[in-house]
């Protein structure tokens, strides 16, 4: 789920940079917790050689309102 949060944060920042309004009402309607399209015995590949990019915990997204 953390990976989903990171991906969603990046996409929301991109939308904001493109001029779309991203506010607290919008953020209240989305969730990183998936409940559809799950693979019950899904494919989980762990690549121990993959470089992990740093996570920024200070990513302002929402405009006030």
Image (cartoon, helix red, strand yellow):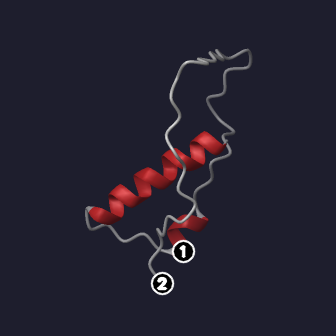
Name the one closer to the observer, 7 or 29. 7
Name the one closer to the observer, 35 or 24. 24
Assign a secondary structure to mark 2: loop
Outermost residue, bottom direction? 65
- The spot of residue 39 in percent (x, y) is 67, 21
What is the crowding at mark 1: few (fewer than 14 residues within 10 Å), some, or many (at least 20)? Answer: few
- The spot of residue 40 in percent (x, y) is 74, 19
Q: Is residue 48 left or right of residue 61?
A: right
Q: Is residue 49 above or below residue 56?
A: above
Quadrant occupied by the N terminus: top right
Label 1: which residue?
24
Q: Is residue 48 left or right of residue 62?
A: right
Spatial CA span between label 1 and label 2: 7 Å
For image coordinates 25% across by 62% down, the residue present is 18
What is the crowding at mark 2: few (fewer than 14 residues within 10 Å), some, or many (at least 20)? Answer: few
Q: Is residue 56 above or below residue 37?
A: below
Q: Is residue 8 above or below residue 13?
A: above
Outermost residue, right direction? 40
Question: Do the CB atoms of the residues marked 1 and 2 lie less than 8 Å apart?
Answer: yes
Assign a secondary structure to mark 1: helix
Sequence-first disc among 1 and 2: 1
For image coordinates 36% across by 71% down, the residue present is 21
Q: How many marks?
A: 2
Label 2: which residue?
64
Which numbered disc covers residue 65? none
For image coordinates 52% across by 23% down, the residue present is 50
For image coordinates 60% across by 67% down, the residue present is 28
- The spot of residue 49 in percent (x, y) is 55, 18
């Amino acid at each position: 789920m953390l990976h989903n949060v990171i991906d969603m944060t990046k996409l929301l920042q991109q939308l904001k940079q493109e001029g779309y309004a991203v506010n607290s009402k919008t953020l209240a309607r989305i969730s990183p917790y998936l409940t559809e399209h799950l693979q019950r015995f899904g494919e989980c590949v762990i690549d121990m050689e993959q470089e992990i990019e740093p996570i920024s915990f200070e990513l302002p997204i929402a405009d006030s309102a």
